[in-house]
Amino acid sequence: MCDKGSSRLQIDWRVDDEVTAYPDAVEAMETRVAGIRNSSASELIWLTEHPPLYTAGSSADPAELISPDRFPVFQTGRGGKHTYHGPGQRIAYVMMDLKARNSDVRKYVRALEEWIILTLARFAVKGERREGRIGVWVVLPGKQEAKIAAIGVRVRRWVTLHGLSINVDPDLSHYGGIIPCGISDFGVTSLAALGQFPTIPEVDMALKETFPQAFQEFGIGDR
């Protein structure tokens, strides 16, 4: 389903109730981005899930794909290394025209991080940034750190593709087939593993409600 966002530019929201095949998602993103560039389509925030799979970003090391036959592996144009996608993980694909909003890619990535942090806070989870480690992290009871959300983006002629993923309640054992994001010193976690059990629609609502605050510098929420 789709609805309209409120901003000085028009942003559509698409929310999927079922899993989306990864190649279909990439094709749909490419088509939408082309439309944004030629002004025939609005910007889009797309919330979805995928069946279990691994993706390899532009700096992925083949040695970090431990179990290449476990799930399908897709080469992708986003930045970063290997990551996992699967049911119980909410993905937000962001197709935004930075040239029309704020031509600062670093601020864009930081806004994605802030969006995750604000969303996690709705479920009493403190997400944190870590210098030199992309994504959002939490401190576990034993003081170990674990990754709860990943970010992987591509910017083509100032229009963004890909986005972020938040672990709501995925099968965390599926991460065992890769070294997630090339970082072997830390684990991964989820809202469920931390004792929080929101539904996917509740996470979607939190993402919608926190989006304007996270992207204030990009003209979101202007009336």
Image (cartoon, helix red, strand yellow):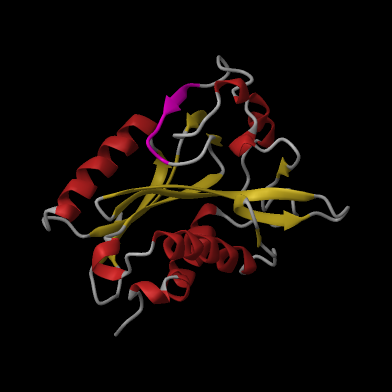
Q: Residue at x 80, y 54 (%)?
A: 140
Residue 77 colored magenta?
yes
Q: Residue at x 45, y 36 (%)?
A: 50
Note whether 91 is above or below 59 in the view shown. Answer: below
**What is the quadrant of residue 22 in the picture?**
top left
Q: Nearer the viewer, residue 197 or 13?
A: 13
Residue 206 colored magenta?
no
| Residue 214 drawn at (x, y percent) | 47, 71
Q: Residue at x 82, y 50 (%)?
A: 144
**One can see residue 211 in this view:** yes
**What is the quadrant of residue 8 in the picture?**
bottom left
Query: In the picture provided, is 36 more to the left or to the right than 208?
Result: left
| Residue 70 drawn at (x, y percent) | 58, 18
Q: Quadrant of the N terminus?
A: bottom left
Query: Magenta part of the protein: which range?
Result: 72-78
| Residue 101 drawn at (x, y percent) | 29, 69
Note whether 18 is above or below 69 in the view shown. Answer: below
